[in-house]
Amino acid sequence: MYRYEVQKKLGRGAFGVVIRCFDHKNKEQVAVKILKNWNKLHKQGKIEIKILETLRDSDHDNTK
């Protein structure tokens, strides 16, 4: 419900696009990756989420 305000396209690849957004809930800049709706990308997207969660969980001070 209007949480993310799109500000700028940061990049584009074969599988989707990355955009810079302002997160109105947390009041911070975030990058949002949007994957194309292809069945073969679903598994790859889940793998990428696990990698990002591992990186987030390793950064206890939220500085990296």
Image: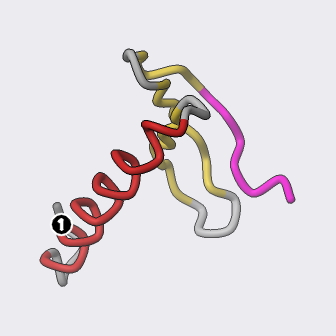
Q: Residue at x 42, y 24 (%)?
A: 15
| Residue in front for this viewpoint, 62 or 51 | 51
| Residue in front for this viewpoint, 7 or 56 | 56
| Residue in front for this viewpoint, 21 or 32 | 32
4 drawn magenta: yes
Q: Position of residue 13 (x, y in %)?
A: 37, 17
Q: Quadrant of the N terminus?
A: bottom right
Location of mark 1 (residue):
55
52 drawn magenta: no
Q: Position of residue 5 (x, y in %)?
A: 71, 41
Q: Is residue 33 above or below residue 3?
A: above
Q: Residue at x 39, y 16 (%)?
A: 14
Q: Is residue 30 above or below residue 41?
A: below
Q: Position of residue 10 (x, y in %)?
A: 43, 22
Report whether 13 appears left or right of 37: left
Residue numbers of the magenta segment: 1-7
Q: Amino acid at mark 1?
A: Leu
Q: Is residue 14 above or below residue 57?
A: above
Residue 41 found in image quarter: top left
Residue 44 found in image quarter: top left
